[in-house]
Amino acid sequence: MKKVVLASDNSGFRLKEAVKKHLLELGYALDDVGMVQEDTPVAYYDAAVNLAKAMQTGNYDRGIVICGTGAGVSMIVNKFKHIYCVACESVYTAERCSLINNANVLAMGENVVSYAMGSEMAEKWLAANWCEGFSDERRKRNETGFSILAQVENENFR
């Protein structure tokens, strides 16, 4: 079972709590490094930095970060080396960004995604494994794409 780190700001707190409850029921090991009490706000940039730094420790397989839109937190976490985040608004995109793009962080927005959809997105995203079920040709193409991403990342020191 994958170990997951979560974080949200005050705009994503309720969605994060719904997703957290759902994933705990599924048996995932979770740590929350963002806003943990409704009366103690955390800024989106602090939640994103906390999550990215936690991911960089190597203690987590995946991360989920939530704000009002998913955009602000994804922009920040993507500035950290070895963090590959996609802001998603559908179950299909969430699942595919794991399967095809090897995204290790999922971003969502509470103002865009319902609690039920966010929970389903997180479940499908966590269940999908990079290139699983792909032909050798498709797998090689995806691995080449990810290799190019790593080359670009290494040229831009963070």
Image: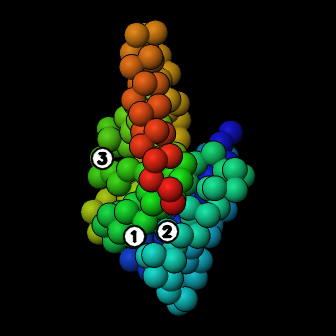
Mark 1 neighbour class, 10 Å CA radius: few under 14, some 14 to 19, many 20 or more: many
**Residue 52, image x, y percentages:** 56, 61
**Residue 49, image x, y percentages:** 53, 70
Contact between marks 2 and 1 (CB within 8 A): the answer is yes
- Residue that carries the numbered disc 2 in the rendered image: 48
Q: CA distance from mark 3 to mark 1?
A: 16 Å
Q: Which mark's residue is nearer the viewer, 2 or 3? A: 2
Earlier along the polypeptide chain: callout 2 or callout 3? 2
Q: CA distance from mark 2 to mark 1?
A: 9 Å
Contact between marks 2 and 3 (CB within 8 A): the answer is no
Name the element at disc 3: loop
In this view, 35 is above or below 118: below
Q: Is residue 116 visible?
A: no
Earlier along the polypeptide chain: callout 3 or callout 1? 1
Mark 2 neighbour class, 10 Å CA radius: few under 14, some 14 to 19, many 20 or more: many
Name the element at disc 2: helix
Q: Quadrant of residue 57?
A: bottom right
The total of numbered circles placed on residues is 3
Amino acid type, callout 2:
Ala
Amino acid type, callout 1:
Cys
Instruction: Report the disc number at residue 155.
Output: none
Mark 3 neighbour class, 10 Å CA radius: few under 14, some 14 to 19, many 20 or more: some
Q: Quadrant of residue 11?
A: bottom left
In this view, 141 is above or below 94: above
Residue at 53% x, 41% y is: 126
**Residue 17, image x, y percentages:** 52, 67
Instruction: Tell whether 46 sits left or right of 117.
Output: right
Instruction: Report the disc number at residue 67.
Output: 1
Q: Quadrant of residue 51?
A: bottom right
Q: CA distance from mark 2 to mark 3?
A: 21 Å
Amino acid type, callout 3:
Ser
